[in-house]
Amino acid sequence: MVHPQSRRRSVTIASSNPSKGRQFIRIAKQVSRLSPRTTPVWALGLLALLGSGGAAPGWSFEQETQTWTTAQLVTPITGDTALGLRYRTRFSGFFEGRSLYQYQVAAGKALGDDLRVDLGYELFRSRRGTVEHRYFPQLQLRSSWAQLPFRQRLRLELRDLVIRDELAYRLRYLVGHRRPLGDGGAYLELRNEVFFSLSEGDGLERGFVQNRVGATVGQRIGHHLRAEVRYQYGYVDNAVLTRGDHLIQFYVLWDRR
């Protein structure tokens, strides 16, 4: 059993240009107005901007380390449909009780060699019993740009925030690029995901609210199994707080397709 340690601290990130963080937020909020054809361009631009510290604001905000442990099973139903089951434990200093448990089920259908549609449900539960339900359709697309392969995912989430007794909508867009590391089944993947709130309310505001950027090192083990270690930096800016998360994830996938 993994017993990761988590820590939370409030820091002030110094910047020679105090407006840099605010400038990043303005840029991110304009992302949704860009042409889909330029998606890999702006996604990699955000990756470079975050990697260079461009997203670091010049004011005090929470910073936290989270450790995620994830196991996922994907099994075929028919020739072009499949069922996915996923369990994840998140340890952190942000959630009460320092832990959060996620259960996900999703059914998907391939619409071609490069396009897939999924319908899913996800349950979040904290150690204290706080619950959130999520329902989502999503599209997954494989494409290429400048002779580089990209994996893209567009998800619309309906969030049932039980503790607030309200519904909220959120749009998530992810783009990733994977490259093999030698001939032994190892690979490296770079990814970036942006989150846009479509709702306003108690603790919610419309527009850009979160960005996760990171890298994955994975290893295929046989035909159906693979294991990964992931690092992501998550930048959160909503009506409640501004936070930076260091996310370390251990991920195992058994894909029976």
Image (cartoon, rainbow, N blue to C red):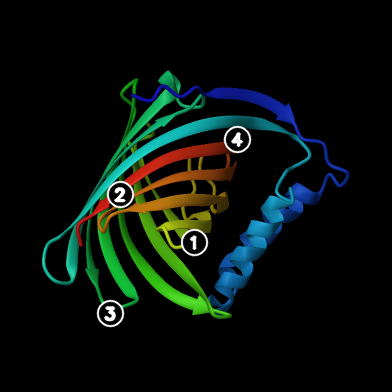
Question: Which residue is at a point 58% across and 30% down the rendered structure image?
Answer: 64
Q: Can residue 237 be seen in this view?
A: no
Q: In this view, does 136 lie above or below 143?
A: above
Taking the spot 45% from the left edge, 39% from the top edge, the residue there is 249
Tag 2, which secondary structure? strand
Q: Give whichever of 167, 83 is nearer the camera.
A: 83
Give the alpha-carbon distance from disc 1 to disc 4, as whole Å: 43 Å
Looking at the image, which residue sits at the far front?
A: 183
In what element is the residue under mark 3?
Answer: loop
Q: Residue, x 63% and y 31% (percent of image)? A: 63
Q: Mark 1: which amino acid?
A: Gly
Label 3: which residue? Answer: 112
In the figure, residue 49 lies in which quadrant?
bottom right
Spatial CA distance of label 2 from label 4 is: 33 Å
- Viewer-nearest of discs 3 and 2: 2
Q: Which of marks 1 and 3 is in front?
A: 1
Among the 4 quarters of the image, the one containing residue 138: bottom left
* Mark 1 vs 4, N-terminal side: 1
Image side of residue 213 versus residue 154, left or right = right
Mark 3–mark 4 distance (CA, rounded to whole Å): 42 Å
Q: Which amino acid does label 3 sit on?
A: Gly
Label located before the other in sequence (2 or 4)? 4
